Image (cartoon, rainbow, N blue to C red):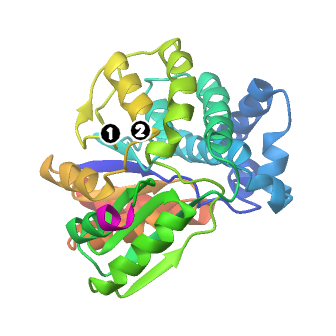
């Protein structure tokens, strides 16, 4: 059984998608559709930067979505289709577009607003995120509870065993990092992010986004989409939308998502879009997982070989 997994924010880089668009008309059409949906050249921002504009959350989110869907359309054109899908944070939108729950143009526009609302929910500099390495997630949660002191700090991304990202107010994240080290964390790494995603500080963004998400047209996904909020498969449009609403301020339970994919019978994972972050996490969570990624035309052969071997 094959799963597609779609990356989230942090996987962006200048130049992403260019080789796909130049090599395959089916990919170029996706970039053209994104430019039309937004009324500006998102494709040029992906291909040429500048980086300081690409890393703005309201640009990063539609950019990664577009590159991911360009790659997904290429796989589809080659007859490669998943039996189940998932995405990390923003990537859950890519997953829903790839399997037909959401229209691509609608998704590009909504994730631009999602990025904007998330950025505006917390003044720059007042929030923070940090990766806690080498500590069990219940211990990370306990460190956050001890450090809160009336502020917000909590696990935000449960990425893999021994890799948990925390988010909240800057001072509380600092205190929680110190408590985590005292409990045995190997390292605490501050992350270069513009806002504290997936924690209670994002509730204003969730409240702004919710009515807009619920107003979108949806269709029944062709295959199940395992959601970040509860690691459960969503098989209809309304359930998909509610999971995307809750996702804004809830932790990304990626370790549980991959566990759910594995329990469904997935043995091969294709990371679809920029970067290889999820490929690394999948290998940490499922030691026997077979993983490939598609970001450029050069990756296609390895993906096709993996799919053939799994289907043999």
What is the crowding at mark 2: few (fewer than 14 residues within 10 Å), some, or many (at least 20)?
many
Q: Please check the rendered image and state whether residue 147 is part of the magenta-colored stretch, yes or no.
A: yes
Q: Is residue 192 magenta?
A: no
Query: Contact, CB < 8 Å: mark 2 with mark 1?
Result: yes
Taking depth in this image into account, of 276 and 147 the one nearest to the observer is 147
Is any part of residue 99 visible from this angle? no
Q: Residue at x 33, y 55 (%)?
A: 254
Q: Which numbered dot is residue 247?
A: 2
> Nearest the camera: 129 or 293?
129
Q: Secondary structure at mark 2?
A: helix
Q: Residues within 10 Å of mark 1 (few under 14, many from 20)?
A: many
Does residue 118 sit above or below 104 in this rendering? below
Spot occupied by residue 36 in the image (x, y as percentages of width and height)? 79, 26
- Point out which mark residue 227 bears: 1
Magenta stretch, overall SS:
helix
Q: Viewed as shown, does residue 112 lie left or right of 48? A: left
Is any atom of residue 178 visible in this view?
yes
């Amino acid at each position: 059984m094959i799963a597609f997994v779609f990356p989230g924010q942090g996987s962006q880089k200048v130049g992403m998608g260019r080789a796909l668009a130049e090599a395959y008309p089916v990919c170029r059409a996706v970039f053209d559709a994104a430019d039309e949906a937004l009324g500006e050249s998102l494709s040029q921002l992906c291909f040429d930067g500048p980086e300081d504009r690409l890393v703005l959350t309201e640009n990063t989110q539609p950019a990664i979505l577009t590159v991911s869907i360009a790659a997904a359309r290429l796989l589809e054109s080659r007859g490669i289709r998943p039996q189940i899908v998932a995405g990390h944070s923003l990537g859950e939108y890519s997953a829903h577009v790839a399997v037909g729950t959401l229209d691509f143009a609608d998704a590009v526009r909504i994730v631009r607003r999602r990025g904007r609302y998330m950025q505006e929910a917390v003044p720059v500099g007042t929030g923070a995120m940090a990766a806690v390495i080498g500590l069990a997630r219940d211990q990370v949660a306990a460190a956050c509870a001890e450090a809160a002191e009336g502020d917000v700090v909590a696990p935000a991304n449960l990425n893999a065993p021994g890799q948990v990202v925390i988010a909240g107010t800057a001072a509380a994240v600092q205190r929680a990092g110190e408590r985590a080290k005292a409990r045995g964390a190997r390292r605490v790494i501050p992350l270069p992010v513009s806002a504290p995603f997936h924690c209670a500080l994002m509730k204003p963004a969730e409240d702004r986004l919710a009515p807009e998400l619920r107003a979108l047209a949806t269709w029944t996904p062709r295959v199940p989409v395992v959601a970040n909020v509860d690691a459960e498969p969503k098989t209809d449009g309304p359930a998909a939308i509610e999971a995307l609403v809750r996702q804004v301020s809830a932790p990304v339970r990626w370790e549980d998502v991959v566990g759910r994919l594995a329990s469904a019978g997935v043995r091969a994972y294709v990371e679809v879009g920029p970067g290889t972050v999820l490929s690394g996490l999948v290998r940490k969570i499922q030691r026997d997982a077979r993983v490939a990624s598609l970001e450029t035309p050069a990756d296609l052969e390895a993906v096709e070989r993996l799919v053939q071997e799994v289907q043999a």
